Each structure stands twice: as structure tokens, then as C-alpha cells.
Image (cartoon, helix red, strand yellow):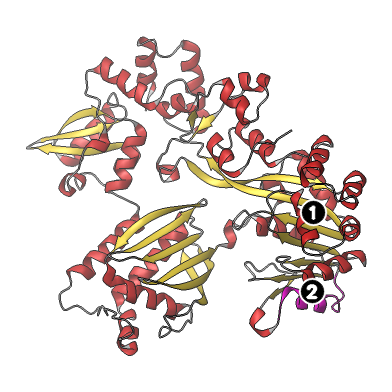
């Protein structure tokens, strides 16, 4: 979008000269369109900008959500052209094409589309996010289109090579089911879903059977999104294909199973990368649900400075992990990034003069130079038994996946008190409550005070997309209510998600962590020995400079990293 837009908005008195200058600088620095720059700086909303253009130029402003576009109209313009120019064809009458545009003053775009289609162009105005939503809806990503094509091919095949096996209770032919999974369309369908999920950066794929459909969802940046709804007849061949790939028993449909798939995929830049996938099947009333956890090592951050630690919290944590002995605990719910933090810590300490051993359930990523053990409860290889064996292996540093019971905690405490550094996780709400969780497991307060040196609580929040985030005009009262001081509430700039092609129209791209790092100093040790309540321990830690999860979130809101909604979703306000 060119400078014409800025001049039009200046004439409408919707922008000042200073704002126009700032927008031009932002546009140049961030390599975005003028409209995106104006919205990102909070000068105007997308709708205000589109309506101003409509008044100035006389072109209609439309809500694209109210339009259904026919495939023959969509096919007039290639997807890459629609994305490059931010346009969407919506209607054709004889030799006239109605084209939704963000900036109808761009005559070069209009001329290019006219030349490509051979049609006269009638521009209408729509917001950038609405056009991007329509592009994703009607064009989709390349892999999405490929999946749809494969499904259509299978649906249209009358006596094709794919045999769909309808299951009635347990009356099915295993050999026939196995054969159906080896047919080319099913193989291609499953592979394409895998590749699409990996390219999109999904952490999980869910295959979910219901009464009348078979749903596929991806978890992107911690949130599940529905990607496709397949006909129910795809359920058995797709699930069986996944079970064969992961070395699971396709004949067993009554019990949960676990498996593993290793894939090597070719990226658009020509490089290849290996991805490890953990597969879990679970029988439901409408068939087996399969969830695949994608373990992409290229997505793993092992640099402590990139995880989201505030400077003061990182200093406390770094000092703790370089201690010669003691227990460091990381706490938080499933999926809060605890494993990444632990891997980053032991990778920081990984050197030729250290013997580092881990017991995990399961080992998620292989780290060269570290001895990693898969816990297997069914054969007696538990966290506790692994720890006992570690102590006979001359270790310096040990990582225990989780402290689930007294035996594991007891051995970890003894290891810490005999000169070893031990890392582990516990499931609690915050750092202070971890102390009472250990007491509830049967550990004496004096052992906790003597062995535990640092407790870290963490949560993951989504990061705002830098391309499309917009100013969020919250009142100072609302900002004070979430935890800002009255002075901060008057000065802080808050941003909210919008949605663009860069972030799959979610408004968020990537995740970062909120951290609460509590150092077990002499004052905290005295409180532990006195069996003080969690809220009293937390209050003392805050007095001594600890940043809470909510405070960590407020800092990231102030820095424009995440939104108010994300922080409110993952944290609670600190009480006095």
C-alpha cells in the first residue's frame, strides 16, 4: 500500500502529519504495508481506515464475511497473487470482475489483475484481516488444498483402489483392513496431513471419531484448531495406517496403545529434517481417537535467554543451576514448557567434565553428551529405581522427569545432600505451594530446607503477531484491576491480536513463558522449618524481589509481547 493512502487519511483529518511520518518510518523499518503500519501504531482500526477510503474514493465498503464466493470466481486469480496484492475476487458479471481490495488507489495492482483475467475491474473496499480470512478460507494453504484434492479423489472413486471397511462391533477383516491402509490415496492423505502439521508448526495432531464425522485438529501455539472434517468412512483406514506406521497392533481396538513414528520431510528450501512423533490411541464410544505429539527438535530452544526469563529471574536461576549440589524444581501444569526449561538448564551445564544423567517418561529429545534413560513402569524401571542406579554411575548432575511419590523424592533428597545437583518437576500452582506439596509426600521440613535451592513456576502464553497486532484501548481502571500501578496504567501501551496471513489469522505467533523464580534463602528456610503457610512464604519471597507469574505477565504486556487476555488466562492476581 503506497503513500496515497496516508495522504487520503491526512485529508480526512484522521491522521496528523506527525502520525503519517511515524507510520512511514514504521512501514519502512518493519517492511509492512502502510495500512498495517497505521493499525499497528494504534492510529486507526482497520474498519475506520476502510470506511474513510470508501468516503474519499466513492467505492463501496463491504463485509467479506457476508459473501459466498463461487469456485469459478476464485480460480480467476492464483492464490499467490491474491496474497501478494491483498485482493479477493468476489463476483463476476459478464466481463466485469468485482474485486475486494485494501487499497483501491493502487492502479498498478488493478492493471495487473485486469491483464491476468482479461476482465474489467470494479474495486470494492474491505479490511486487510477480512481479505486475509477470505484468502485462507477459499484458497487455503498448499498442503490444505492437497488434502482436499486427495479426499475428493477418494470420494469420487466408484470402484477405486481404496477399500473402506465399515466396522460393526468387532466383526471386521484384519487382512482387508491392513490392505486398505496400503492403498496409495490413504498413504498420501496421512502423509500430507503429517507434513502440513509439521510445516504449520503444530505440536499435536488429533484424529477424533464422532457419530457422523471424523475430525482432524492441530494444536498451534497451545490452542486447538479444527483443520478438516472427513467422512466417517475414512476413520478405520486412516487410524489403521497410523497404527501400522507406529508399530501398534491394528487388531487391538479395545485397549489404549502407544507408538512412535520417525519422519524425514523435505522443506521448501530443499533441506530435510527429521521429526519424532509419539502416537497414542484411546478407545472411545465411536472408535479410536489418536493423538500424535510432534517432537520437532528445530523448535526446541536451549538458550536460557530465549525462554522468557526476566533479567532478575534469570540471574537467580542461573546462579542456582551453577551450584555444586541441591535440588532445583520446575513446576506447572502439563504443557507449560517445563521440559524445555530443564533441557535448557542441563544443556547450559553440559561439558566434557560433567556426567549428566536423565530419567524421563518418555525421552522427548536426544541431547548429545547426556545419558538419557526411558522410564518403563511395566518392567519395574521407575523414576526411583533409575535414580538408585544413577547413584552407582558416578553422576554429577541428575534429571528426574517427575517427582511422583515419596521414594523418588527421598532418593533425590539424599542425592542432593551427598553432593549431587538434581533437577525435577512437580505439579503445583506456584513456587511457594511446592514446599507443602513435598511435605504432603512425607518429606520432613528440615530435609526440604537443606536440599531444595530453587523453585521455578512457569506458564506458557502466546506471543502477539508483530505484523498485525493493534492497540487495545483499555481504561486505566481496567489496567489497575489486573495489577498495574495507577501510574503505569496511565502510561502503558497495550496491544491485542488482529489476524493476518503471517499468523494463520489467529493474531498470535509463537509462545513465550512467564516465570516465577523463588530462591530458597535463609529466611525462606526458616519459614519452611516453621511449616509456614504457602501464602506467607510467597509474601516473603515477593518482599525479597521475586517476580510472580502475574508480574512476569504484566512485564510482557508492557513490552508488547503478549495480550492482556493471555496473561489473565494463565495467571491469577497477587493478593496482599
281 and 90: which is toward the camera: 281
Residue sitting at 20 percent across and 42 percent down?
68
Q: Is residue 575 left or right of residue 54?
A: right
Q: Which residue is mark 2?
A: 387
- Image coords of residue 56 (percent x, y): 27, 15
Nearer the observer: mark 2 or 1; the answer is 1
Q: Is residue 101 magenta?
A: no
Quick one: quadrant of the N terminus? top left
Closer to the chain start, of discs 2 and 1, is 2
Q: Is residue 386 magenta?
A: yes
Q: Secondary structure at mark 2?
A: helix
Q: Secondary structure at mark 1?
A: helix
Residue sitting at 16 percent across and 38 percent down?
91
Residue sitting at 59 percent across and 37 percent down?
561
Q: Which mark is residue 13?
A: none
What's the magenta region? Answer: 381-395
Classify 10 Å Cα crowding around label 2: few (below 14), some (14-19), many (20 and above). many
Q: Is residue 512 left or right of residue 419?
A: left
Q: Is residue 404 left or right of residue 472?
A: right
Q: Which mark is residue 435?
A: 1
Amino acid at each position: 500500500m503506497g503513500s496515497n493512502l496516508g495522504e487520503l487519511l491526512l485529508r480526512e483529518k484522521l491522521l496528523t502529519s506527525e502520525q503519517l511520518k511515524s507510520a512511514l518510518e514504521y512501514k519502512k523499518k518493519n517492511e509492512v504495508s502502510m495500512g498495517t503500519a497505521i493499525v499497528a501504531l494504534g492510529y486507526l482500526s482497520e474498519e475506520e481506515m476502510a470506511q474513510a477510503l470508501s468516503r474519499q474514493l466513492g467505492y463501496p465498503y463491504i463485509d467479506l464475511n457476508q459473501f459466498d464466493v463461487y469456485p469459478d470466481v476464485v480460480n480467476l486469480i492464483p492464490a499467490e497473487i491474491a496474497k501478494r496484492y491483498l485482493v479477493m475476487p468476489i463476483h463476476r458479471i459478464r466481463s466485469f470482475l468485482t474485486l475486494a481490495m485494501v487499497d483501491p488507489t493502487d492502479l498498478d495492482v488493478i492493471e495487473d489483475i485486469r491483464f491476468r483475467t482479461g476482465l474489467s475491474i470494479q474495486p470494492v473496499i474491505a479490511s486487510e484481516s477480512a481479505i486475509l480470512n477470505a484468502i485462507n478460507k477459499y484458497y487455503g494453504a498448499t498442503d490444505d488444498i492437497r488434502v482436499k484434492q486427495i479426499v475428493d479423489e477418494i470420494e469420487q472413486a466408484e470402484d477405486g483402489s481404496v477399500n473402506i471397511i465399515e466396522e460393526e462391533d468387532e466383526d471386521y477383516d484384519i487382512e482387508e483392513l491392513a490392505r486398505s491402509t496400503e492403498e496409495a490415496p490413504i498413504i498420501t492423505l496421512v502423509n500430507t496431513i503429517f507434513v502440513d502439521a509439521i510445516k504449520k508448526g503444530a505440536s499435536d495432531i488429533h484424529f477424533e471419531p464422532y457419530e457422523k464425522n471424523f475430525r482432524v485438529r492441530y494444536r498451534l501455539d497451545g490452542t486447538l484448531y479444527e483443520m478438516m472434517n472427513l467422512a466417517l468412512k475414512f476413520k478405520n483406514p486412516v487410524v489403521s495406517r497410523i497404527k501400522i506406521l507406529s508399530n501398534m497392533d491394528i487388531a487391538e481396538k479395545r485397549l489404549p496403545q502407544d507408538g512412535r513414528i520417525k519422519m524425514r520431510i523435505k522443506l521448501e528450501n530443499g533441506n530435510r529434517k527429521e521429526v519424532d512423533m509419539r502416537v497414542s490411541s484411546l478407545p472411545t464410544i465411536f472408535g479410536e481417537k489418536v493423538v500424535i505429539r510432534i517432537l520437532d527438535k528445530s523448535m526446541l530452544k536451549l538458550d536460557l535467554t530465549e525462554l522468557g526469563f526476566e533479567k532478575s529471574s534469570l540471574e537467580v536461576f542461573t546462579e542456582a543451576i551453577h551450584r555444586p549440589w541441591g535440588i532445583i524444581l520446575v513446576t506447572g501444569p502439563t504443557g507449560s514448557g517445563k521440559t524445555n526449561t530443564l533441557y535448557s538448564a542441563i544443556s547450559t551445564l553440559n561439558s566434557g567434565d560433567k556426567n549428566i544423567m536423565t530419567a524421563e517418561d518418555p525421552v522427548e529429545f536426544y541431547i548429545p553428551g547426556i545419558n538419557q534413560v526411558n522410564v518403563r513402569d511395566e518392567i519395574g524401571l521407575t523414576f526411583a529405581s533409575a535414580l538408585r542406579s544413577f547413584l552407582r554411575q558416578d553422576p554429577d548432575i541428575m534429571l528426574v522427569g517427575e517427582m511422583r511419590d515419596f521414594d523418588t523424592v527421598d532418593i533425590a533428597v539424599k542425592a542432593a545432600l551427598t553432593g549431587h545437583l538434581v533437577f525435577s518437576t512437580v505439579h503445583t500452582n506456584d513456587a511457594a505451594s511446592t514446599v507443602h506439596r513435598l511435605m504432603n509426600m512425607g518429606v520432613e521440613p528440615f530435609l526440604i530446607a537443606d536440599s531444595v535451592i530453587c523453585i521455578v513456576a512457569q506458564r506458557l502464553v502466546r506471543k502477539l503477531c508483530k505484523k498485525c497486532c493493534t492497540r487495545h484501548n483499555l481504561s486505566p481502571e481496567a489496567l489497575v484491576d489486573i495489577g498495574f500501578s495507577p501510574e503505569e496504567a496511565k502510561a502503558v501501551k497495550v496491544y491485542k491480536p488482529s489476524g493476518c496471513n503471517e499468523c494463520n489469522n489467529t493474531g498470535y505467533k509463537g509462545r513465550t513463558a512467564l516465570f516465577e523464580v523463588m530462591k530458597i534463602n535463609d529466611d525462606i528456610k526458616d519459614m519452611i522449618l516453621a511449616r509456614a503457610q504457602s501464602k506467607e512464604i510467597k509474601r516473603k519471597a515477593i518482599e525479597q524481589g521475586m517476580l510472580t507469574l502475574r508480574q512476569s505477565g504484566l512485564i510482557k504486556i508492557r513490552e508488547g509481547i503478549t495480550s492482556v487476555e493471555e496473561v489473565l488466562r494463565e495467571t491469577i492476581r497477587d493478593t496482599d
